[in-house]
Structures are given as C-alpha cells and as structure tokens.
Amino acid sequence: MRLSEVELRRLRLPLVRPFRTSFGTEVDRDILLVRVVTDTGTEGWGECVAGDTPLYSSEYVDGAQQVIRDFLLPRLAAVRHLTGEGVAPALADVKGHRMAKAALEMAVLDAELRGRNVSLADHLGAVRAQVPVGVSVGIADSIPALLDEVGQYLDQGYVRVKLKIEPGWDVAPVEAVRSRFGDVALQVDANTAYTLDDASQLAKLDAFGLLLIEQPLPEDDIRGHAELARRLRTPLCLDESIVSARAAADAIALGACAIVNIKPGRVGGYLEARRIHDLCAANGVPVWCGGMLETGLGRAANLALAALPNFTLPGDISGSDRYWKRDVVDKPLHASAGQMDVPDGSGIGVDIDLSWLEEVSTSTESVDLSGSRRPL
Ligand code: SMG
Ligand code: MG
C-alpha cells in the first residue's frame, strides 16, 4: 500500500456551549481532517486534535497543517509498503508534532484496516463492546450555572463528571457538586494551572473523595508532581506530561502519577497509546481515555482504544450532542446510561457525512505527492 492522494480539510464547527478551561474559552473548533487514498483504492480518514492556539500544548492547527504538508507527507509518500505500523518510524526523525503525526497514522490505519476488513477495536485488542463514559465540564460563570450543567449531564446518564479547575475555582465548585449530587464519581482537571506552592490549597480537595486530580503542574514538571503526590491523598493523574511511553515510564518510576490519561493525539498516535496502555497495565497503573473535543471521527477511534482491558476508568468520551448540533459523521455517536458502543465496522468504523462536511469546510488542500517519490 502506498499513498496516492492526500487531502487536508479544515472545518469550523460551533460547540453547543462554550468550553472554558484554565487556558481559555473555546466557542468553536477549527478542525483539521486528513483524507488519504492509497494505490490499492482504499480511503482513510484521520483527525488532528491540535487546537487553534498553542495553549493546551505547543501544537496548533495551522502549524500541524504546515508540518504535515512540508515535512511529514514527503516522508510517508516515499514509503512503498505503507502500513499503520510503519507511519511512526517513517516520521521519527521529525521532532515532536505528535498531534500532526497521530492524524496521519490514524488515516493510514483507517485505510489499511478498511482494506483488510478489520475494525480498529479488534486491531488494537479491544475486550469490550461498550465502554463507560463521563463528561468534562468547563469552568462556569457561577456555581448555580455549574450545578445546572452537571445536573443535565447526570440526567443524561453520564457515570462520571470531571470539573475543570483553576486557582479561585477549585474547592467551592467541588464542594457544591458533592453536596448537591452526593457520591457521583467526580474528578478535576487543572490543565497545569497550579504550582507546588498551591499544595495546601489542593490538599483541601482531599476532603471530597475525588477519583483523581489531573495535571495540576506544568507539563515538564515531573519531579514537582512526584513531590505534590506525597503531599496529597487524592491520586494524581497526568495528561499533558505524558507525551510518550518513555515519559509514562519515567513518571510512574518517579511516583509522579498513580493514574494516566491517554490521548492518542498527544502521544503521536493510537499505536503509541496502546504501548502506554500496556506499560501502565504492567505497572498496575489504571488508565482512561482523554478527549480533545473531537468530532465523531476521533471519538469513534477513542472508543476503540477505551475498550482495551486496562481502561478501567470512564473516559472523556461523550455523545455527539455534548459537542455539536450536527456531527460530521453520518450517524451521531450516542451515550446511553453512561455507556457508548465501540464501533465494530472496518477501520475506525464511521463514515463522514460528505455533504455536511462540504458545508462546514473552510478550506481544502490537495497535497501534491509527486515530488516525494524517492524510494527509501
Ligand atoms: O473531549 O470531552 C472532551 C473534552 C475533554 O476536558 C477535556 N479535555 O485537558 O483533558 C483536557 C481537556 C483538553 C481540551 S482542550 C480542547
Ligand atoms: Mg486534561
């Protein structure tokens, strides 16, 4: 299998409600989708999870499109016997840009698996047909507004709630949700907004029986997380810090986290995500699948990953209606009683609604692969 055509498609989709985190408020998503066509005639789709600003991590969507066009695709197009497995090695000399690489790996895997009539879930080693899912709730304008939003999600059956926190919005919202909704499974995510000096403030959260505190300190502060872990009873979970299986191994060895959030985009793809899953399983560290406000395409693939055995905590994978008025997949993904079906069709197992995609597209770039035909 060899790449014969690649299209980079940008779309803008409004969120059903603004999503506020410690690093900003998103009202819509500027999304990059990658469509590949191979010489065997199969097509595959990938989604890049980079945001429009480099505020969650250093990647951002314009940069991702550029690195894909100028540096990653020339390398991939030169590979004669391309498989999903071969994508990361072919791109390994390009440093970083994991979200861009992950989007390409996803598209190639989709094409390969569709050609072989194998589902991504089976390919990754899924052991469940349904997975429990939670919802991530942004920072609200007020406590009553937060309680209203959390109440809506619980009414819809979500089995776990994650609250975004930042200095000034931590103990009070957690206390309010606990006292209104009792012992609902609850966790918080700080997106790097704290420092070690805040340890005593974060320790106040110990009173509320949280499942975990996610990424309180900066991405590269593994030692700081290890120190903080010693000062808290609530388990620490890392998100931004875990950029590879190697980073996960270091964080676990140093005692910086007891739980890992796995996001395929953040770690360079689904195959590295599976390696992190396996490493965590071998170390007795539970994992769960994070979310990046993906369309149904990215979330369908995340459902496949979340069906692996060591995903023992509910993921940030909600139904299409949590994010979009109209998703770009032809059948919206649905959460019911806090569970979502793992797609079982070939490849990622969902189809793009092409006429809707056309309507929400802001640009379409066909990449010229002809200059990249040097054999490796
Ligand atoms: O996809 O449901 C979702 C959002 C989950 O909170 C979520 N993601 O740090 O874990 C995280 C944030 C990053 C979102 S930035 C787009
Ligand atoms: Mg997070």
Image (spheres, rainbow, N blue to C red):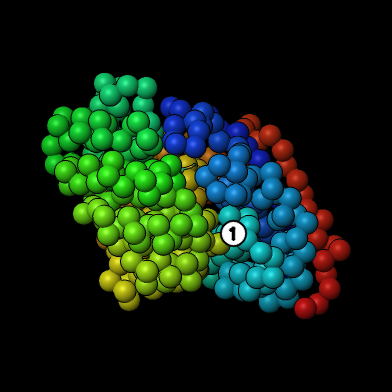
Which is more toward the observer, 246 or 5? 246
Neighbour tally class for label 1: few under 14, some 14-19, many 20 plus, Cα within 10 Å: many
Which is more toward the observer, 216 or 198? 198
Would you say 104 lies left or right of 240 here?
right
**Spot occupied by residue 221 in the image (x, y as percentages of width and height):** 46, 57
**Spot occupied by residue 260 in the image (x, y as percentages of width and height):** 36, 60
Residue for point 73% across, 50% down? 66
Q: Tell me the quarter of the picture where residue 175 sits.
A: top left
Residue for point 60% across, 43% down? 54
Q: Residue furthest right?
A: 371
Q: Tell me the quarter of the picture where residue 368 sits.
A: bottom right
Q: Tell me the residue that label 1 is attached to.
A: 98
Residue 90 in view (yes/no): yes
Would you say 41 lies left or right of 315 here?
right
Residue for point 41% across, 62% down? 223
Can you say whether 43 is above or below 24 in the image? below
Q: Quadrant of the N terminus?
A: bottom right
**Spot occupied by residue 263 in the image (x, y as percentages of width and height):** 45, 56
Residue for point 30% across, 27% down? 146
Can you say whether 16 is above or below 51 in the image? above
Q: Quadrant of ligand 1?
A: top left
Residue 358 in view (yes/no): no
Q: Amino acid at mark 1?
A: Arg
Does ligand 1 reach within 8 Å of label 1's beta carbon? no
